[in-house]
Amino acid sequence: MKNNLTTDSYKSDDNTMELLQDYYPTRPLTRDEELELGTNVDHKIVKNKKSIFKIISHLKALKRYMMAKDVKWYRKSVVIAALVYFVMPLDVMPDFAPLLGYLDDIGVVAWTIKFLGNEVTSYYD
């Protein structure tokens, strides 16, 4: 079955059209606009790179929490489940998918940190 969706059959409101026009200018970008865009992209990459490395500190804290002798076994089981899910290559989004494959892993780690709350804060560097 072929999809016969045309621009005439798609009706959008004026706000959507204005938003699209902001992203798709009617003229080519000037050299200054290209440089500004490139600078903004570089800044965003550096900013996100720092955020990505935060997951490493969370993983290290979870590992220390799991190895601590004073933590109850059922609290450790939550951490073990999260870490096993993180290291398994096959899960909801397979890890071999570029970038997207790690989103669910990061979500599980974030949920675990949130679940444990203040208990895990003393295990960070």
Image: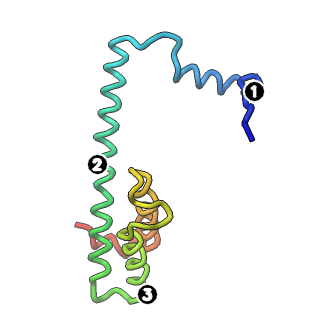
Which x, y percent locates residue 57?
A: 28, 63
Residue type highlighted by circle 3: Tyr
Q: Please tell me whether mark 1 or mark 2 is closer to you in this view.
A: 1
Callout 1: 10 Å neighbours few (<14), some, many (20+)? few
Q: CA distance from mark 3 to mark 2?
A: 32 Å
Q: Label 1 sits on what residue type?
A: Lys
User: How far apart in space, not on screen, are marks 3 and 1 (Cα)?
Assistant: 54 Å
Above or below for 63 versus 43: below
The C terminus sits in image quarter? bottom left
Q: Amino acid at mark 2?
A: Lys
Residue in the picture at 32% in, 39% down: 45
Residue underneath mark 2? 50
| Element type at mark 1 | loop
**Mark earlier in primary sequence (3, 1):** 1
Name, please, the residue furthest toward the left. 125
Disc 3: which residue? 74
Closest to the observer, 24 or 18: 24
Of residues 5 and 26, which is closer to you in this image? 5
Q: Is residue 54 left or right of residue 114?
A: left
Residue at the image point whose x is 30% and y is 33% from the top: 42
Q: Quadrant of residue 124?
A: bottom left
